[in-house]
Amino acid sequence: MQGFVKENGNYDVLIIGCGIVGATIARELSRYTMKIAVLEKASDIPFGASRANSSMIHGGFDDEPGSAKAKFCPKGNRMYHRLHEELDFKLRKFGSFVCAKGESEERHLKKLFEQGKANGAVGMEIVSGQKLREKEPHTAPDITAALWCESGAIVNNFEATLAFIDNARQNGAALFMETSADGLLFDETRSSVRGVSTNRGNFRAPVVINASGVYTDVISRMAGDDSFIIHPTRGEYFIFDRTVGGMVTSFLFSCPSALGKGITVTHTADDNLLIGPTSVQQAGRDNRNTTVPGLDETFDGARRLVPGIPRNMAITTFSGVRANINTGDFYIKALDRPRGFINVAGIKSPGFTSAPAIAEYVAELMRENLGDVVKFENDPAFVPERKHIPRFIDLPNEERARLAKSDPKWGQIVCRCESVTEAQVVEAIRRGARTVAAVKLWVRPGTGRCQGGFCSPRVVEILSRELGISPLEITRHGGDSYMLTGKTKQPLLPESAQ
Amino acid sequence: MSDYAGIREVDVAVIGGGPAGIAAAIAARKEGALKVVVFERDWEAGGILQQCIHPGFGLHMFGLELTGPEYMDRYLKQAYEAGVEFALNTMVFQMDPPAETDGRKTASFWIMSPKTGIEKVHAKSVVLAMGCRERPAGALGIAGSRPAGVYTAGTAQRFVNMEGCMPGKKAVIMGTGDIGLIMARRMMLEGAEVVAVFEIMPWVSGLRRNVAQCLDDFGIPYYLEHSVCELHGKDRLEGISVVKIGKDRRPVDGTLRFVGCDTLLLAVGLIPENELSRMAGVEISPLTNGPVVNDFLQTSADCIFASGNVVVVYDLVDFVSEAGERAGSSAALYAMGKLSKPRELPIETTPNIRVVSPQKLCGGRDTTVFVRVAEPIEGRCRLFAEPGIFSQTLRYARPGEMNEVKISAEKFRALPETEKCVRIGIEAF
């Protein structure tokens, strides 16, 4: 990766964090001629809450009318229905149900329905429990009614985040991985920001956008704005084998309570079954551990919606940490002093849905407030379309045959469970994947039922070959997460040869 | 269609070039099938035995203690002599439900290789021999972080024996499946420290001889009724939490402890790989997770046969080879239109039997039914098949080891017409 350079260059705008918020902003700004750099602390994208969530594109009925969430969510939903084609990430229009049990929850459905209408959500209808079970035969018999929302959709959240940053990079944005924002640079009077200091040296720019997820309050305090606090809130999930993915065909919510939207059950964009999340506030921002009570709560909650979910078909568990904010709503603000600093904070659910709409808003905010320091000139070379790496598993046999004929690497399966070919892995590495986890996020080897049992030795080998480094240097997810610790037969060698 | 490399017509197609598939292919040729092709996704035939460089294979079959590669070598030589064809580095990625041509069912599937691209294969009969895979950590719902250094034992075995790399320096083994026991010793031999083996059940799930040869001989401690419940470490594994499990199957208060290690190897069960079988529409048993078969090792689809660990997870490779032979010769007879089934009776078992394979009997030839008990019986017991087919006294019966019930075709055929099933069981004295 990039080494330390005292001055890492001059830019017009720096974006801290490459989750869905940072990635969509980078892509939006890459329409203009400005020089953009995105600074990401992790070794693979997406890393924080953008990686570990329900991958739902919400309809927009959940939020209090008048709130920023209510404004951005339905708009974001509409944008995704267009963007997934433009940027080629997986989005599937499954629709969603909010499931109610009994009269008081049914009253809540009515409230959501009205709220949705006020927010501009489309395709909503309240249906009977009977009707729900006709479409979703595995749902619990005691569900009495459900709110259907046709515009609810599922994305592959890894692909979506990668698609935005990939397109931004094609249009000239720079991405710096394993680069953590340690401090801000100001002019002498601290009236304007001048850049960011990092473990890789100083990056200079008159505009700094804080999209650092659970760290937004920490970075905001560096700029002197301590008006909000992030409460990291953990959610735990299970993923189930594709063979039971068909137990549901849409996104099922429990009726929301004071605690949040509750446990959901969904058919993912890649045909697995996903259940979760719990909602537990915690002290650590980086603690993504799963817990025994958390996993039990997830499973029990999901079974209240779909009683027959078989626990022995689980293939993995994970947890994500949401950037819940003490003020409740999204906090998006350009500071007056220091000038040039923009907070995009508290982007929790429906944050993923809202992100493209937020990105447009941030661009407007910049143009209005900082138009004098950054020029908004349309880049004539801007290309809005971008292609993902072809997904072998989804291709018809004719297309598979064509690719296999064009390059033998397309004929070489690396991951049996998800039918990933060597060509896909090589292309992911060419586009920036450097770790086993990054390759997995790009093209999915290791996401299937054997969880990397067969393919991880192959992925290590290909990474080592393509990057020209020893297999011993390959990590799972950066840092010290080495996959291997040495060569065999070392005890037999003299110490000098080890 | 121009990008397809073509269509291949074969008599018996064998999917999987491990011990089951190769034995099946040899038997199919010997039975008289003309074109017999083994489709293998790895670069070499041999399956998992390629990486099993320890001895212990072939005691039943050859009366010798061979290593995995030595055992396979004997079969591969026979296969070449018998005229078996191999399609290596060739993945069967799609199977179609059997079609009916001229009143007989035939099979078809799709293959891909870097050399020839995509081809379709038509086969008069198929032997499924895809083997099994290991249950991964994620499936267990272990709490904690997601560090590097957590591998299934078989993946670690591949790294050590095939790639010449060490997956870690200080290992804990979770589960007492045979590969876990073997890898405990293997890691030790390569200079790694093996702290302990933990097993959640009150008994070892692998072979007793492996406990003696891999753990006891190397002073590696193992703890029954212990569960690894949490992983620690951000980048690389730094340790695990382990807890004692009581008779009520719940953690015992006050027994939680931390064990430092940089590697956790899992040997917590094998799952038959039946994705292709499902595509073909073959009936799968929820108990074995493999196809339901009769003693011809014929599945619910007439032209599809199955053998080895894809049907039921065996304890010894010798039995896998034996099953492969039976499936291969049956598949050849079917391909030649010579397989006849005079009568088919289901097998019923006593409740202490967890696994039985095959599940149905036709009595075409003398055959072996394999059973595993659900819980150990430590003491003399009787293994039987009734009415009046088989009876044997055993010194013990353990879940880690399979028991063989010999069924004589003659006795089976002599059963009165009124018999509706064969009862197999084990009873303690």
Image (cartoon, rainbow, N blue to C red):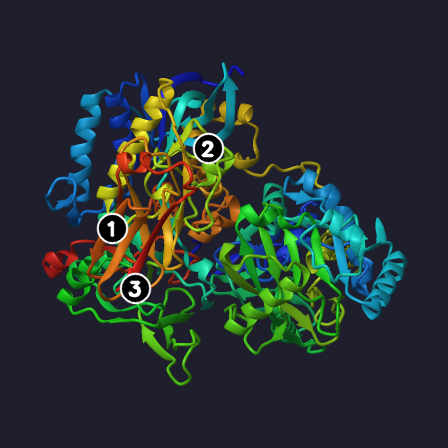
Quarter assignment of residue B360:
top left
Residue tagged by mark 1? B391
Q: Chain of mark 3?
A: B
The x, y position of residue B298, in whole percent, is 39, 33
Query: Which residue is identified by label 3?
Result: B376
For disc 1, the neighbor class at 10 Å (few under 14, some 14 to 19, many from 20) is some
Amino acid type at mark 3: Pro
Among numbered discs 1 and 2, the one appearing first in the sequence: 2
Q: Is residue B228 visible?
A: yes
What is the spatial separation of the Cα atoms under label 3 and label 2, in whole angstroms? 40 Å
Query: Mark 1 or 3 closer to N-term?
Result: 3
**Measured Cα–Cα span from mark 1 to mark 2:** 44 Å
SS of the residue at dot 1? strand
**Label 3 CA crowd tier, 10 Å (few <14, some 14–19, many 20+):** some
Circle 2 residue: B93
From the viewer's side, name the closer residue of A301 and B378. Answer: B378
| Residue A274 location (% of width, % of height) | 60, 55
Q: Residue furthest bottom?
A: B254
The quarter of the image holding the C terminus of chain B is bottom left
Residue B353 percent across, percent down from the top left: 36, 56
Q: As shown in the figure, which amino acid type bears the numbered disc 2?
A: Phe
